[in-house]
Image (cartoon, coloured by chain):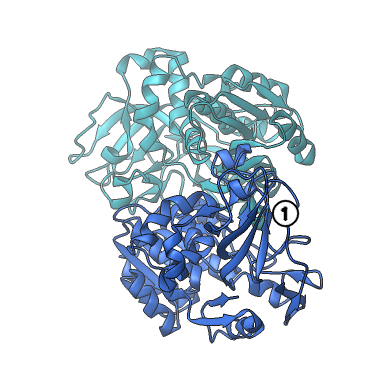
Chain colours: A blue, B cyan
Amino acid sequence: MRATTIHAPFDMRVEDVPDPRIERPTDVVLRVLRACICGSDLWAYRGVAARQPGQRIGHEFLGVVEEAGPEVRGFAAGDLVVAPFVWSDGTCAYCADGLTTSCVDGGFWGSVGSDGGQGEAVRVPYADGTLVKLPAEAASDDHLLTGLLALSDVLGTGHHAALGAGVTKGSTVAVVGDGAVGLCGVLAARRLGAERIIALGRHTARTDIARRFGATDVVAARGEEAVAAVRELTGGQGAHAVIEAVGTEQSMRTAVAITRDGGAVGYVGVPHGSGTGLDLSDMFDRNVALRGGVAPVRTYIPELLPDVLDGSVDPSPVFDLTVGLEGVPDGYRAMDERTALKVLVTP
Amino acid sequence: MRATTIHAPFDMRVEDVPDPRIERPTDVVLRVLRACICGSDLWAYRGVAARQPGQRIGHEFLGVVEEAGPEVRGFAAGDLVVAPFVWSDGTCAYCADGLTTSCVDGGFWGSVGSDGGQGEAVRVPYADGTLVKLPAEAASDDHLLTGLLALSDVLGTGHHAALGAGVTKGSTVAVVGDGAVGLCGVLAARRLGAERIIALGRHTARTDIARRFGATDVVAARGEEAVAAVRELTGGQGAHAVIEAVGTEQSMRTAVAITRDGGAVGYVGVPHGSGTGLDLSDMFDRNVALRGGVAPVRTYIPELLPDVLDGSVDPSPVFDLTVGLEGVPDGYRAMDERTALKVLVTP
């Protein structure tokens, strides 16, 4: 089959690789209908996160079960399913707690020896613990299918950030980061009943989506200027719930600075940089909490799915460029150059 | 009157200072019955936290109202009251949220221009928002009075840490720090229903108190050795709720390392050191939250008071040395040299 591989920074290729097959009785082989490129894939693309030459890539996908191993109970050939961005056994103590990202048998798509989502097919370990079934009729609804793809990562990750930030009905929320996760954070905050949502971003195309997703205010600034603007919008106090969806030291500093005393930063931007960007003394004096991390989206899919199916939550606008599988390297280039927000891949 | 002043690192004096008087109609003048020395006072004593020469000190005290300003509603001369370690107006948005430490009119005892608790008397601003009345009969119960003094800081701070760490019924808790706050963290965790409480500490006298307060296990180690021991006690996973009651980079590193994936560090040790001690990537990968800060003990006193009054919570063992007011400099020396855990002052 054809699949995307990464050979060196900025060297993405689409190559012939061995067809996936059932290796363990709990595996499923899944034919990919939709995949996409994640902002976090760019860390590998840019060489910030190390990869071995030829490693697969892509951790967001949905598709049709082609073959199910003999011990798979919940899925059969022909089922339409979505995969979260890590696999998990569904049975360990962490999975029982809903923290599927800490599963003792879990792993990341595209890690050495595993398939990635940016390819024609994927071997899915622990299929019963990992996959979630989608209604068969969604397969013929192009728009819906794109929205459902967001369940594999960005929508659940935005939801995790909103929960970490403590968003509840009536909250004032600020969102640092105008990428797909930040925008999904806006969507998740609105879904959780936030009354006011301040989106920080300087790209009109993106902040327009933020407004469409429920942002009530946009702050087109960064750093101290952004902090001052958010404080001014919130009577000098800051937002009780702040979503951090970038992962740099500067974005973390901004997030803490715009959090109201007693509030929380829900952080889902993968941390990069030598320090933390955190002023712990300031956080201590103001009782600002920090809660988040890699999102256990498998746990969230059943809760978010009905809202995507009925259209009340529609994350599909985050996908603004579509490529075929052979076009994946172009997709990376476009996201790296920020000419695309998020790239949809239709193998 | 006589009061403790700090002139330079290690230079504590007890001197004649002006008697406090009602300056604003919302003030109370309080005669101190019991005060104490806090581990955090040692940061000033050691010169780590800067003070102006002659500044007052001491932020934990209880006593009897001597005079109440004309606008004070809740207190009259003769009332027995306890003061939390910051004053607060009781009416601002933060006070309404229970975050009295962020009160817009709040302040710390011993800050420039204010009285400290280690003296004969204190002018208490915003008395109605700040003080909490105690039963008059407690004044004649020496043991109880000592326990009630812990409401001014250490018991409420331990409670704040336990809440920040997310302690609930059945939790497995680990406590980093065997000072009075750490020990009160043990007490608070037990009160909140923790099933297992692992106290980290290498001083038998202190860990004996921890056991008396409810610790089920003691780890007499630091750093990596302590991490390994806690992990071994918890099936390799760590504790879901970890109380950090030291404030150094090493203690924070230890606290994060012994937290179970998905758990939280409740931190109340005043942060000192140039960095944070936090490995944000590790916290991200394992969804370890950080929640805490300066404890709004004023908010907690009404909840904790009944348990101290009925003896079901007795923090008094944390006081292991008693001095008169003139003995306060000796008390600092004893705490600095760790020959005393916490010094009670009886002016």
Residue drawn at point x = 46 percent, y = 45 percent: B110
Horizontally, is A28 left or right of B113 in the view? right
- Return the chain for callout 1: A
* Rendered location of residue A210, percent (x, y): 38, 73
How many numbered marks does the figure carry?
A: 1
Residue B192 vertical position relative to residue A280 in the rendered view, above or below: above
Q: Nearer the viewer, residue A34 or B298?
A: A34
Image quarter (top left, top right, bottom left or bottom right) of the N terminus of chain B: top left
Q: Residue at x 60, y 34 (%)?
A: B329
The quadrant where residue A19 appears: bottom right
Q: Identify whether A32 is placed above or below B309.
A: below
Where residue B198 appears, as percent x and y from the top left, is: 65, 28
Q: Residue A184 at x, y = what percent?
A: 44, 66
Q: Is residue B31 left or right of residue B186?
A: left
Can see residue A258? no
Q: Nearer the viewer, residue B280 or A65?
A: A65
Q: Is residue A77 among the parts visible in the rendering? A: yes
Q: Residue at (36%, 28%) from the top-left corner? A: B303
For image coordinates 42% across by 37% down, the residue present is B297
Q: Is residue A273 left or right of residue A197?
A: right
Residue position for label 1 = A22
Q: Is A23 in front, or is B229?
A: A23
Q: Amino acid at mark 1?
A: Ile
Q: Secondary structure at mark 1?
A: loop
User: Is B217 placed above or below B165 here?
Assistant: above
Q: Residues within 10 Å of mark 1 (few under 14, many from 20)?
A: some
The image shows residue A157 at horizontal and vertical percentages of: 51, 60
